Image (cartoon, helix red, strand yellow):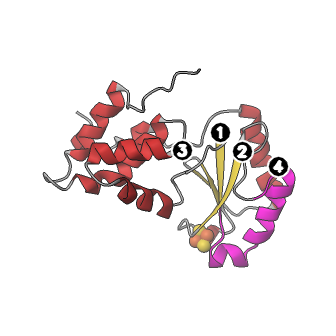
Amino acid sequence: MAEIKPIKFSDEALSLCHKIMKRYPEGKQKSAILPVLHLAQAEFGGWLSAPVMDYVSSLLSIQPVEVYEVASFYSMYNLKPVGKCVIEVCRTGPCWLMGAEDLVKFIEKKLNIKEGQTTADGMFTLKTVECLASCGTAPMMQIGETYHENLTFEKCSDILDNYKAKGENVSHWRKERITNHSDIKQ
Ligand code: FES
């Protein structure tokens, strides 16, 4: 029988976690939940399983349900395994008016998946999200940390081909981003 590994941050991640928690007053560690969830997502393969969320709740000394509530509310947290590139197409008003719906259909056809699914080769996951604050350059999508704007089918197709050719994992938030605060850089 395969050994089940206990969920535990690496020493580096645990140290970062404690530095993040120290930003908040004693007894208010719950306030660290968003960056700690990003850290957990980066640490545990790009998504948050129930055992990972339970682990976060134990670190923050809060109830597991409090973590589930937050993780399921924000679209940047993945509650199931994702591909190397998570495509997030904005579907809110301005993007919708500029053709986001057709863009999603185009991507679904190109990648042979439906929204919420991951390609068989594990390269792409397609999600739709609410406004990403780039309404003036609609329609747009976010992949990893990069915005791709003023999209046409052709432009979108080239962008996806490029990611596929590189084959890099760009779905996860980088730890450097999480730690880009003067109080935890020391
Ligand atoms: S509506 Fe799409 S970025 Fe705002």
Task: Look at the numbered discs 3 and 1 and tell me whether their residues touch, using CB distance below 8 Å.
Answer: no
Q: Which mark is residue 111?
A: 4
Q: Circle 1 sits in a helix, a strand or a loop, which is it?
A: loop
Please state the quadrant of the image where ligand 1 appears. Answer: bottom right
For marks 3 and 1, give the CA distance: 11 Å
Residue 127 within the segment the image draws in magenta = no
Magenta-highlighted residues: 89-114
On residue 47, the disc is 3
Q: Residue type at mark 2? A: Phe
Image location of residue 186, percent across then percent down: 22, 33
Marks 2 and 4 sit apart, C-alpha to C-alpha, by 8 Å
Mark 4 Cα shell of 10 Å, populated few (<14), some (14-19), many (≥20): some
Percent of width and height locating residue 45: 54, 36
| Cα–Cα span, label 2 and label 3 | 14 Å
Location of mark 2 (residue):
124
Alpha carbons under labels 1 and 2: distance apart: 6 Å
Mark 3 neighbour density, 10 Å: few (under 14) some (14–19) many (20 or more): many
Real-space Cα distance between discs 4 and 1? 14 Å
Q: Earlier in the sequence, mark 3 or mark 1?
A: 3
**Earlier along the polypeptide chain: callout 1 or callout 2?**
1
Q: Is residue 16 above or below residue 86?
A: above
Could you tell me residue 180's position as x and y percent? Answer: 34, 43
Residue flagged by tag 4: what amino acid is it?
Leu
Earlier-in-chain disc, 3 versus 4 = 3
Spot the residue most to the front: 1
Q: Is residue 93 above or below residue 154?
A: below
Residue closest to the eye, 3 or 57:
3
| Quarter containing the N terminus | top right
Judge by depth and name the residue closer to the eye, 91 or 66. Answer: 66
Amino acid beneath label 3:
Trp
